């Protein structure tokens, strides 16, 4: 179940981050104009997707990182 959550993180955040970085049409309506807060949110989303990928690799290698995964998923709520 934790692996599915990490895969879902990556699947959702990669297109969102790509659209934000390209300033794709419609992003201003959803996230507001390109300002510092929007760039910070983009950086956080990139960090979450990188951490999700790293933890998914750890799971594939047999390294149980359950506390780190639970912490990452909890931080996303806030």
Image (spheres, grey):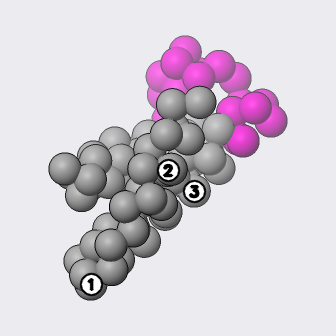
**Residue ID for mark 3:** 47
Question: Residue 39 appears at what percent x and percent y?
Answer: 71, 41
What crowding class fits label 1: few (fewer than 14 Cα within 10 Å), some (14-19), or many (20 or more)?
few
Q: Residue at x 55, y 15 (%)?
A: 29
What crowding class fits label 2: few (fewer than 14 Cα within 10 Å), some (14-19), or many (20 or more)?
some
* Residue 67 forms part of the magenta stretch: no
* Residue 31 forms part of the magenta stretch: yes
Marks 1 and 3, how far apart at CA: 21 Å
Looking at the rendered image, the quarter that the C terminus falls into is top right
- Which image quarter: residue 33? top right
N-terminal of the pair, mark 2 or mark 3, is: 3
Marks 2 and 3, how far apart at CA: 10 Å
Q: Element under label 2?
A: helix
> Is label 1 or label 3 in front?
1
Question: Residue 44 appears at what percent x and percent y?
Answer: 62, 47
Return the residue nearer the eye: 29 or 75.
75
- In screen coordinates, is 53 left or right of 71? left
Inspect this view and state whether residue 22 appears.
no
**Residue ID for mark 1:** 61
Residue extending farthest to the bottom is 61
- In screen coordinates, is 62 left or right of 36? left
Question: Residue 19 appears at what percent x and percent y?
Answer: 47, 41
N-terminal of the pair, mark 1 or mark 2, is: 1
Q: Is residue 77 above or below residue 9?
A: above
> Which span of residues is magenta-colored?
24-40
Q: Is residue 27 above or below residue 73?
A: above
Q: Residue at x 65, y 50 (%)?
A: 43
Return the residue nearer the eye: 8 or 31.
8
Residue extending farthest to the top is 29
**Residue ID for mark 2:** 72
N-terminal of the pair, mark 1 or mark 3, is: 3
Tag 1 near tag 3, CB within 8 Å: no
């Amino acid at each position: 179940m934790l692996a599915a959550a990490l895969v879902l993180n990556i699947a959702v955040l990669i297109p969102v981050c790509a659209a934000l970085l390209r300033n794709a049409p419609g992003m201003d309506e959803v996230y507001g104009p390109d300002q510092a807060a929007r760039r910070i949110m983009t950086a956080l989303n990139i960090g979450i997707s990188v951490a999700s990928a790293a933890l998914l690799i750890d799971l594939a290698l047999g390294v149980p990182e359950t506390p780190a995964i639970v912490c990452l998923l909890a931080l996303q709520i806030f």
